[in-house]
């Protein structure tokens, strides 16, 4: 079957002068239909203008062969219904997606995926040290949330933060350079994997659960300042049992803070499955008096629609809301955890093949003729290059200078003296 | 009769020092009332009243010096800063409708309302985290712990979320917050409510730790702390709240601040340097008064700030007196006095010491309840006198 596919596909390439052949049957059918379209009597002029130039030299950018007119500009998709807690109605079960949006989400998720895989590589080469908690598998959460909120809204998460650091605006280059501890890193190499910040993005927090009261506080500031902004506060299934979460839920509900509490339930808190850690695994109900929704976290459209719903809820002054995103991480808890002692390889493989967020989106778009396989490949190639360049920078940029050691203790304060390792070592700290 | 105008209700008793209360503005009506009261007393009592009269204003300008309790100084500081900057707000248990567990925030909720003065549930870790988050997002919270013993529930937020963030973010994320409340021993509140946290918090880089003694310290340092763009731990003392002190003219200004990181010499002397902070400065001054009669002149240094510590002032004094005694309420091990000893040894003043540094501290035990035991768990004036004499070898 694959052989047949390749034969027909290559033939078609030779005829039409295209460089990249179809990889799947559906793509082949699309190519064939296009060829038929091109060579039909009805549009002979079109056929002539669509002829491809000779094969460009290797390494050059592939020119997309189709015009925009061929693609479906927008489609509506049925998405999974959310389980609801204390809500009369939930998010829409239909999601509209434009071609541009789809390509945008794809690009975002693929960038995060490739960036995390690159981090994996660098860690194994011992160029990244310490903690490294990778986000691959969960990309739909970060991409979907960002698609539903404004840049002026706020977001805070825990230590599995690289994806959100990217979606909140930090370039891949600065993320990787922070992981490798170089001066070009977003925190000048002083923070590391768990402590990256950006405007309206508050990290990156190492203490499990501590970010949740912080997020409620950011929401308080939004309410106080009356700026109609909201705060998205993320935590995991492991943190969901922390007492300070319930303290935050109480105050957020009491004061109607505009806070979306989001539990990214990836089924394992480090090596402990949710059944072994929580008396109730219905994390969307754990807010008790706070309404909640359980959302398919592997579908970027589901996440987006739910987040939109939640954001409207908060902005209308109804107070906080909880979202549980059911998602999955391919890697172990961190790079120190192979991730297979508490779950089977089959389980990981099954999620990869059936629910991978990037594949799900791509298939949707292809089967609705919203983009071509080449376009996706082109995007992949661009991203690969971006991540390669970023990794190159991250490995060649120098480490922060020793003069930086004691800086940034205090903000807006006169320089002070800091004691070094012995009394004769008097170091200087500036703001 | 309103909470914010205790002044008008107070009878004019010139023998007692007066508590100005929270009011800082003077109105014509008040002026007239005061003048009437002054004249009445003048006609009755003569000399006393004259000086008192001079204290009260005939003119619109602020009095030369007035008496104010530490509680009212703190209240005034917060009132002025709340008025000055919209981003400042106070949150904690009982701070609003109850007027403060120790009445430090009396009148503020009535004046500023629910938005700026927030009563919290009894959830320290939660509300301390909320305060830190609010600071990160641009507000300037004052987070009150009913006592610093309860701050242990929230200490992760103070250290890991507040103190370290500016450094971890390499300057991207400042945290302008004040954590304040009573610290150290009170009276009869036993072990879980009597711990001194000066050493614990002062251990951590990224925090400023302040410990005022008198009303001027309290007002000036709290204003500085609120205006500071960094996390400040502000250690008050419950037993000092009701103690009145004279407030200088300049300290009555709305812009009066005391710089963080500078100690103050409260009493000049040549024979021994006695360094202390918070309540024990009073003890040191009392001990100094007793010793003065025996010809021993103590130089009493009020640290005011624990971190960053003004070691230079201590060194300057030690290089003059050649002897050093530290006095604190906290436990001896790894405490404020221990740090002073280490710093003196590492600096130029060591060569000027004629005897080892002596630390006077709380007894190394959890605080007992029975009065006789409690009294003997903390430095008494006689302990300070004894230690000074031992240090001087007299």
Image (tube, rainbow, N blue to C red):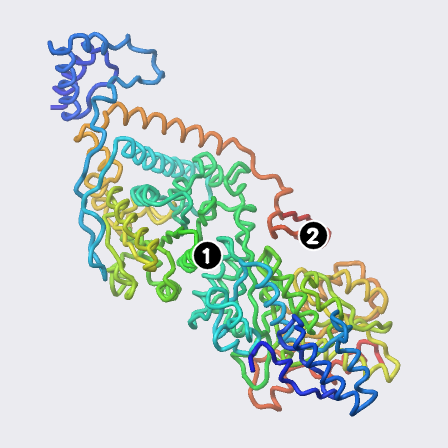
**Which mark, residue B347?**
none
Identify the image quadrant of the N terminus of chain B: bottom right
Name the element at disc 1.
helix
Q: Which residue is at 33% across, 57% downward?
A: A238
Image location of residue A86, percent across then percent down = 23, 62
For mark 1, does the 10 Å Cα neighbourhood hold few (<14), some (14 to 19), or many (20 or more) residues? Answer: many
Q: Which residue is mark 2?
A: A417
Q: Would residue A240 be visible to someone looking at this image?
A: yes
Q: Nearer the viewer, mark 2 or mark 1?
A: 1
Give the residue at the far right of this rendering: B295
| Chain of the residue under the numbered disc 1 shown in the image | A
On the image, which quarter does residue A28 sit in?
top left
Quadrant containing the C terminus of chain B in the rendered view: bottom right
Q: Residue A245: percent from the left, percent from the top?
A: 37, 62
Residue drawn at x 62%, y 57% is B228
Q: Secondary structure at mark 2?
A: strand
Front residue of B220 and A161: B220
The quadrant where residue A120 appears? top left
- Rendering coords of residue A74 (x, y %): 22, 32
C-alpha span from label 2 to label 1: 34 Å
x and y percentages locating residue B216 in the rendered image? 70, 70
Location of residue A10 (image quadrant): top left
Q: Which residue is mark 1?
A: A221
Residue A210 can be seen in this image: no
Dot 2 alpha-carbon crowd within 10 angstroms: few under 14, some 14 to 19, many 20 or more: few
A126 in relation to A228, above or below: above
């Amino acid at each position: 079957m694959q052989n047949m596919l390749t034969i027909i596909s290559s033939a078609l390439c030779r005829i039409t002068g295209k460089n990249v052949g179809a990889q799947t049957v559906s793509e082949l059918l699309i190519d064939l239909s296009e060829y038929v379209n091109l060579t039909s009597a009805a549009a002979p002029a079109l056929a002539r203008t669509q002829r491809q130039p000779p094969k460009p030299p290797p390494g050059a950018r592939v020119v997309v062969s189709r015009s925009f007119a061929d693609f479906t500009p927008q489609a509506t998709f049925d998405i999974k219904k959310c389980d609801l807690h204390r809500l009369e109605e939930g998010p829409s079960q239909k999601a509209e997606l434009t071609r541009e949006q789809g390509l945008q989400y794809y690009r975002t998720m693929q960038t995060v995926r490739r960036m995390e895989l690159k981090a994996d590589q660098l860690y194994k080469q011992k160029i990244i040290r310490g903690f490294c908690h990778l986000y691959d598998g969960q990309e739909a959460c970060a991409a979907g949330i960002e698609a539903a909120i404004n840049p002026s809204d706020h977001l805070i998460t825990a230590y599995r933060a690289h994806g959100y650091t990217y979606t909140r605006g930090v370039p891949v280059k600065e993320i990787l350079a922070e992981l490798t501890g170089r001066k070009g890193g977003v925190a000048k190499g002083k923070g590391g994997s768990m402590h990256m910040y950006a405007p309206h993005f508050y990290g990156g927090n190492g203490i499990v659960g501590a970010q949740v009261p912080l997020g409620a506080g950011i929401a308080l500031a939004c309410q106080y300042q009356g700026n109609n902004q909201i705060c998205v506060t993320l935590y995991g299934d492991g943190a969901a049992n922390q007492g300070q979460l319930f303290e935050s839920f109480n105050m957020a509900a009491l004061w109607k803070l505009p806070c979306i509490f989001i539990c990214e339930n990836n089924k394992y808190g480090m090596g402990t499955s949710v059944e072994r850690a929580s008396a109730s695994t219905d994390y969307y109900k754990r807010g008790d008096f706070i309404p909640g929704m359980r959302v398919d976290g592997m579908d970027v459209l589901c996440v987006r629609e739910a987040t939109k719903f939640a954001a409207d809820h908060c902005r209308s002054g109804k107070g906080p809301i909880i979202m549980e995103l059911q998602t999955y991480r391919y890697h172990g808890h961190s790079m120190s955890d192979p991730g297979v002692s508490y779950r089977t390889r089959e389980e990981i493989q099954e999620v990869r093949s059936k629910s991978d967020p990037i594949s799900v989106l791509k298939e949707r778009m292809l089967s609705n003729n919203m983009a071509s396989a080449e376009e996706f490949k082109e995007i992949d190639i661009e991203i690969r290059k971006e991540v390669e360049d970023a990794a190159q920078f991250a490995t060649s940029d120098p480490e922060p200078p020793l003069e930086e050691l004691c800086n940034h203790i205090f903000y807006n304060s006169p320089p002070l003296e800091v004691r070094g390792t012995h009394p004769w070592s008097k170091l200087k700290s500036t703001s | 009769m309103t909470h914010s105008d205790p002044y008008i209700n107070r009878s004019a008793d010139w023998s007692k020092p007066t508590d100005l209360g929270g009011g800082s503005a003077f109105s014509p009506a008040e002026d007239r009332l005061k003048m009437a009261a002054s004249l009445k007393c003048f006609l009755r009592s003569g000399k006393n009243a004259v000086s008192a009269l001079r204290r009260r204003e005939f003119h619109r300008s602020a009095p030369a010096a007035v008496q104010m309790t530490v509680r009212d100084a703190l209240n005034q500081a917060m009132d002025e800063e709340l008025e000055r900057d919209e981003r400042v707000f106070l949150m904690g248990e009982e701070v609003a409708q109850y007027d403060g567990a120790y009445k430090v925030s009396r009148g503020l909720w009535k004046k500023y309302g629910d938005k700026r003065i927030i009563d919290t549930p009894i959830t320290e870790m939660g509300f301390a985290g909320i305060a830190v988050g609010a600071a990160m997002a641009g507000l300037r919270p004052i987070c009150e712990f009913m006592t610093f013993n309860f701050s242990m529930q929230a200490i992760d937020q103070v250290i890991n979320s507040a103190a370290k963030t500016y450094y971890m973010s390499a300057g991207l994320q400042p945290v302008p917050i004040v954590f304040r409340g009573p610290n150290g021993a009170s009276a009869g509140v036993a072990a879980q409510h009597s711990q001194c946290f000066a050493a614990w918090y002062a251990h951590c880089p990224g925090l400023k730790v302040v410990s005022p003694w008198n009303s001027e310290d309290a007002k000036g340092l709290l204003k500085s702390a609120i205006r500071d763009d960094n996390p400040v731990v502000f250690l008050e003392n419950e037993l000092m709240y009701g103690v009145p002190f004279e407030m200088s003219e300049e300290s009555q200004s709305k812009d009066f601040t005391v710089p963080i990181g500078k100690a103050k010499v409260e009493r000049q002397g040549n024979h021994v340097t006695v360094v202390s902070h918070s309540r024990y400065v009073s003890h040191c001054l009392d001990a100094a008064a007793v010793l003065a009669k025996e010809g021993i002149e103590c130089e009493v240094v009020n640290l005011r700030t624990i971190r960053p510590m003004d070691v230079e002032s201590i060194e300057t004094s030690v290089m003059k007196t050649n002897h050093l005694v530290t006095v604190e309420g906290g436990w001896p091990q790894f405490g404020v006095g221990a740090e002073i000893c280490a710093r003196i040894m590492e600096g130029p003043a060591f060569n000027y010491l004629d005897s080892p540094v002596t630390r006077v501290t709380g007894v190394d035990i959890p605080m007992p309840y029975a009065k006789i035991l409690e009294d003997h768990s903390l430095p008494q004036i006689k302990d300070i006198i004894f230690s000074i004499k031992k240090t001087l070898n007299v």
